Each structure stands twice: as structure tokens, then as C-alpha cells.
Image (spheres, grey):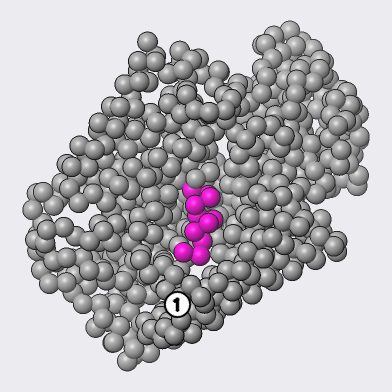
Amino acid sequence: MLIADVWLLVATGALLAGVVVWRRAWSRHWGRGGGAVAAFRPAWAGALPGGGLLLLGAVLFHRGLAWDQALTRALFLAGGLGLIVVMAGGRYRRAPGRRAARSRAVAVRPGSATRPGWRERLAPVARLLLAGPVAGAAALAGAALLAAHGPGDAADRLISAGLAAPLLWAGLGSWGVCAHRPGRAALGLLPLLAALVVPLVWGMR
Amino acid sequence: MTGHETPGGTPGAARPSRVRLALDGHSLLGVGLAALLYLVCLSGAVAVFADDIAGWEDRAPPVSAPPTPAAIDHALAAALRQPGATPVALMAMLPEGGPEGEPGDGAGTFLVKRYDADGGAAIWSADGDGVLGRTLVRPWSVFIADLHISLTASGLWGRLVVGVAGVALLALLLTGILAHPRIFRDAFVLRLDGARRLGWADIHNRLAVWGLPFHLALALTGALLGLGSLLMMVVALTLYGGDMARPYADLAGPAVAADPAPAPLPSVAVLLAGVAGAADAHPAMLYIEQPGTRGQRLTLEMRAARPTHLVPGERYYFAGDGRPLGAAGLLTGGPGLRVYGASVALHCGTWGGAWGDSWGGLPVRVLYGALGLGLALLPVSGMGIWFHRRRDQGRPLPRLWRLWTGWLWGVPLALVGSLAAAHGWGASPLVSFWAVAGLAPLIALIAGRRGDIRPS
């Protein structure tokens, strides 16, 4: 085994230690069930040592790797280790009494079984239209503008546009799909779409 | 789709809370696209092992030492002479690595692949002297990669749908974070001992929170790769008067003018002399477009012995006579090309050779497989929360529940069934997969009376 491999193992150990320290700090702060608060100090104070260990893990990975691979490795591994720690501390046995208590906690919302009116039925369709085609067209138009007029050489602009398109679409789509009043959201999105598409069409002429 | 009740406001209230709105939007998007997201994510979690599965399907005999340039020349020339339609490309995958997305056995094998004009492809193993062996038969590893990349649809549409799934996943992650104000407080809670809906909610939220970096990275790079063709079309239409070749040329390196006149394949030794500056790197892949013509262009990938970046190596372009045309810039070029190279490696899980020379990239693939399976469980747990919430609200959807359950179990059953059918009876994995995956929800709908939602 190479010396670099040893460093990678130490880095992985630091990540695991960071997640475990986070788990312990979380237990002290919130209690075992995640509900009862025993806050004798702020949550961030407990999170600092674990966060420091995770950062140390990333820095140790960087001893043998470039930053892009070191950070990727640290973030993905920390997530995987976190899930293992969560599974190790999970509650699995289904006790009849606890089950009944949990069932009572899930209360039926009063009046939620009433039939929705046509406005309520159409609203999800309108939201999906906003989040899908409208937000998508605006995102692609914005990305094409970035490809045409963004900074850097042609390849830089193309890749920036390629990354911006899904981010813009996801951001605008989230806004559209979460809109309380889809009509008002459309009043915001459609002018934006026009503002992005018109310069593109103008440029094609 | 968090299961924690949030102050949502009663019907008729002026405006629901931001959390309530985010939760409603998250549910709407998730329910609408759950089946697609489940298929894309599950196939991706399996496709990351495509190389390993290919080796299991039809193992190529290993070579004892890296082939000499003369042996590579010999193998490529032999592949070019094989009968069949006109070859549009040849590829040599050399020991200790293969290009992203291409089936190969990893270390120790020497493979040659030929792509024909009619869309067909053949792959051979070669020995250390470059003598081609038998044709390798690996239908399922090709199918699983195709399913993940394009849902087995030909043309642009399949890739676009997968790209849209990536965008939807990004939006779901964003709305999910907005809908979950207790993201840190609940980070370690897993309560599967109580109500089913709360159990589903804990599974959903823990997978989403801890897998967030992986989910964001894979969704963004997947959307980049899936929507790339559409964006190129828009850019070509708006900037280059509809010339599709122009935007691709900015990414794919210098072009060579098409010339169908016959010409010999250039010697690999000449190509290697052209990249003498790439110290501590070995040739991993050679790709030849329009082989055997004067318009051929060659791409040689030199992989670092111990890659420290996400991109495992640099690619170099050559004209048909062996004249160097420059490096692709994946490692040494501008920020755009470097980000592009890293995005492909990040999405495909082809980085990580530097985990340790003795470990190879397998730990990375295992990590991707596990986190990818967790990603596939997000729509499953999200739909579980939604169905149970509907039931608790007195608005159950038993038929939709049965259809969903049929899809949920039908897709993995179809994956296993298509693998068995391909190797047991020589059946097309594409047909057997879609037959099983399509019929399973219908069977569940008709026969699945016992599949109704169980009490919370």
C-alpha cells in the first residue's frame, strides 16, 4: 500500500469521526427522538467540532489529490457515512403501543375530504405548465443569451450556458410550481420569457 | 414531501405559509414525475456497473502486458477489414482503462470496437500481438447504458426526457429544502417503529439530506448531458444560422475536412511520439472517425498513472496522416472544457483511480451504486408519503396505488428478467424489459386487490 493510500484512509477516518461527532452533538442538543429540546448551548456550537473534522477530511484528501476530486470524494463519502450512522441509530421494531400513538399523531385534517372546485382543479395544471414549458423556454433562452454574450471563449460560454440552463429551469420551475396564485406567477414569468426570447430572435435576423 | 405537518393554514385562509407552498409544489412535481425519476435513477445506479456487467456477460481474455504500438496498429487494421457495412468509427480500448460509457473489462483486456454506418457495432477482444479474437456478446450492458441515457429511444427525444428528469430532480431538491425547515434538527432521526407515513417521511428526508451533494451533482451533470443537444440546437439556430456543426466544433476540437479517398491508418507509434510531453501517462483509448479515409480524425486518450483530478486524462487530436491537431483541454484547457470533462467523469463515476493503485475505481462505483439506489428510493418514499397522506385525509387512490406498486416492483423485475432472457434465450433485452415493465402495473391494477394501502 502506498503512502498516499494511507492518507486517503486517514481522511476517510476523519470524515467518519466528523459524522459521529455530529451525531453525538445532535443527541445532546435535541434528545434521542429529535423532539425534546435540551438546549444548554446553541446548535451551531455542537456542530462545529464535527464540521471541523469533515473539513479536515477534505484537506487530507487534498494531500494526494487535486481539489476537484478531493472535495467530491469528501462530500460523497460524508453523505454515505452519514446514512450509515443514521441507519445504525434508527428505530426499527414496530411496537403496538407506539404504533397507535404514531397513528394518533397523524390526524385527519378537518374538511380536507371536500371536493375541490374548478379553480383548485386547474391550479396544478397551470403550475405544471409554468414550471415545464414556460420556465424551460425562459431558461433555454437565457442560456442561449449567455452562450452568445457571456464571458470567456466559445467553449467557456457554451459550458456556462449548458450548466445555467438546468439551474435556471429548476429555479424558475420551482417558483412556478410553488406559486400560490399561478396567474400572478405567469405575469412574472411570461414577460421574462419575452425579454429573453426577443433579443434572441432579433439576433437571428 | 416531508411527512411533518406544517402550519399550512386552513381552507379559505388568505395565504398559506411558504413552507406549505413549497411542500405543495414539491408534491405536485414529485407525483407527476415519480415514475420517470424512479426509472432513470434506478437504471443509473445499475449502469454505473456497466463495465463490470460487460465483463461478466462475456469476459475477454486478459493480456499479459500492454500491447505494443505495432500490435494496436494490427488490431485496428484487422477490425477495419472485417466484413459489414462501412465503418464510421473504430475504437481501441487498451488495458488499464476504457473511455467513459463504453463497456470494457477494465484492467488487463485489449478490446477493439467498430461502429458501422447502419447503426450496428461489434466488439472484439485482441491478444498482446493485436490478433483479434472472437466477437464479444454483451447485449445487456449495452442495453442498461442505453436505458439510462435515452430510455432506449432513438434520436434526440429519449435524451431530452432524461435531461428534463435531471432538471425536475434539481427543482425537487430545491423545493424539498424549502419545505423542510428542520433539515439539521432531524438529520439523524430514523423512526421505522411507528406509523408507516412517518417512517416513509424519515426515509425520504434522511436519504435526501445526506445524499444532497451527490444528488445535486448527478442531477446537474445529468441535465447538462441530457439537454446539451437541445441547447446546441438553440445556439446553432440563434448564433450560427442553423449550422449544427459550429457549436459542436467549439467543444469537440479541430475538425478534419471530409475526404472519402482511401488512406492507411496512421501508426500509433507516430501518435505517441506526438504526445511525448504527456509524461507519467499511458494510452488508454484511441478513437478513429471515418477510419481508412483521408478525412479520418483520431483522438488519443492518455490516462495518468495516478489521476488526481476528476478527469482521468487528457485527449489529443490528430489528422489522418498522424499530424497533431492539439489537446482537447479537458485537463489543461480553459475553465469551460475542464468543467465539461469533470462533469462527464463526475456523472459516470469514472474518476477515482487514485483511490489507490491496488483498489482501482471499484470503491467509487460501489459508492455511486449505493447513493444512486438511495436516489431511486426518493420517489418511492415520496410516493409512499403522498399515498398515505391521501388515505389519512380520507381521499385514498387505490387504483393509482396499485399502478404505482406495479411499476415499483415491475422495473427491477424487468431488469432482472431482461438479463435472464438475454442470456438464457437470446431474447432482446429491450423488448423483454419494456414488456415486463409495461405489463406489471396493469397486472397489479387488475389482480392486486391485496395491494391496497395499509393503515398508517
Dot 1, how many residues are within 10 Å of its Cα: few (below 14), some (14-19), or many (20+)?
few
Chain letter of the residue beneath label 1 in the structure image? A
* Residue ID at (70%, 29%): B328
Q: Amino acid at mark 1?
A: Pro
Instruction: Check the picture and name the quadrant holding the N terminus of chain A.
Output: bottom right
Residue B385: horizontal and vertical position, in percent?
32, 67
Q: Quadrant of residue A91?
A: bottom left
In the rendered structure, which segment of residues is drawn in magenta?
B209-219
What secondary structure prevails in the magenta region? Answer: helix
Q: Does the magenta-highlighted stretch encompass residue A160?
A: no
Residue at the disc numbered 1: A42
Q: Position of residue B41 (x, y in %)?
A: 49, 53
Q: Nearer the viewer, residue A174 or B135?
A: A174
In the displayed structure image, the side of residue B127 where residue B426 appears, left or right: left
Q: Position of residue A116 (x, y in %)?
A: 10, 56
Residue shown at the point (54%, 75%) measured from the top left: A22
Name the image quarter holding the C terminus of chain A.
top left
Percent of width and height locating residue B240: 48, 15
Is B424 located above or below residue A154 in the figure? below
Q: Residue at x 12, y 72 (%)?
A: A110
Residue in front for this viewpoint, B15 or B140: B15
Which of these two is toward me, B198 or B254? Answer: B254
Is residue A90 visible to the viewer in this orientation of the structure?
no
Q: Is residue B29 visible?
A: yes
Q: Secondary structure at mark 1?
A: loop
- Vertical position of residue B115 compared to residue B1: above or below: above
Residue at the (14%, 50%) spot, across then down: A121
The stretch drawn in magenta includes residue B217? yes
